[in-house]
Amino acid sequence: MPSVLLLTCADLPHPEVETGLIAMALGELGIESTVLNWDDPALTDLPADLVVLRSTWDYTTALPRFLTTLEALRAPLLNSLPIVRWNCHKGYLLDLAAAGIPIVPTSIVKQGAAIQVPEFAGADSVVIKPASSAGARGVGKFEIGDPAALEHLQTWARTGDMLVQPFLPEILSGERSLIYIGGTYSHAVCKVPGAQDFRVQSEYGGVVNPHSPTPAEFEVAEAALAHTPGELLYARVDLVAGSNGPLVMELELIEPELFIAQFPDRAALFAGAVAQRLHRTA
């Protein structure tokens, strides 16, 4: 029986059922799966035909160790290590922009180089966040000229590069997430922030609703995916409305929530894509 390791983490910010649904769907295809924390010492010794990243949501707090752990794996990794390396720093947004893909305007402030907060034409506020982060860790929204913005930037830039973007009021109407499994569009959601916050994560009051992507959203999402450095088992493209069309906010290729809990039949699609990869590596 083929076997798959599904990697998660010990410190989950909220209950995570998605990985369990995937494990059940794999079992229905005759594929044995083990759910394991990515930093479990037993990881590199367990026999497996494939290793799949899932809810490794704390990896950015120990990024060098995370990458070293993945390098030591004996089985093929999905998504692959080159994709993980490219996607773990949000500087990839500048790669997308250089390829002509519309992104939320972005400025990178290098570690230890936070002298002033970048400004953007027409923006009243900026969003500041670590260039390597997951969820809303280290994210802050500040009005232009607020001394707290530079303080936040300098504090976090002591330990890593930072990302500064204009705050787009359109985010209040929702962030569109298009999910792809096995290289094919699967489903989409609109993540709406809570009434008192701009962040869309559930722990801040965000709500998830089904979404039907527009042709323009499909076009931007698929252009972004075409620019990734390798074949993808899964992907989530986060978009926000801009004045001239959709903009890429993030391209999640490492440990995205795929909202399979809201679309449970998609667990079978994910398991089928894994089975295809197992067949190719056999």
Image: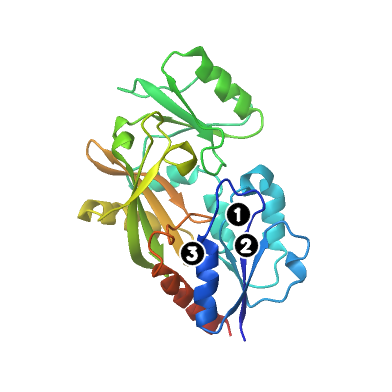
**Residue 219 at x, y percent in the picture:** 27, 55
Element type where label 2 sits in the image: strand
**Residue 161 at x, y percent in the picture:** 58, 34
Q: To which residue does mark 1 refer?
A: 56
Of the pair 234 and 93, the residue shown nearer to us: 234
Tell which tag, 3 or 1, sits nearer the viewer.
1
Of the pair 189 and 166, the residue shown nearer to us: 189
Residue at horizontal 52 percent and vertical 51 percent from the top: 87
Q: CA distance from mark 2 to mark 3?
A: 20 Å
Element type where label 3 sits in the image: loop
Label 3 CA crowd tier, 10 Å (few <14, some 14–19, many 20+): few
Going from N to C along the chain, the mark reached first, 1 or 2, is 2
Say if mark 1 contacts mark 2, CB within 8 Å.
Answer: yes
Q: CA distance from mark 3 to mark 1?
A: 20 Å
The vertical placement of 16 against 173, above or below, is: below
Q: To which residue does mark 3 refer?
A: 230
Tell which tag, 2 or 3, sits nearer the viewer.
2
Q: To which residue does mark 2 refer?
A: 7
Q: Quadrant of residue 6?
A: bottom right
Amino acid type, label 1: Thr
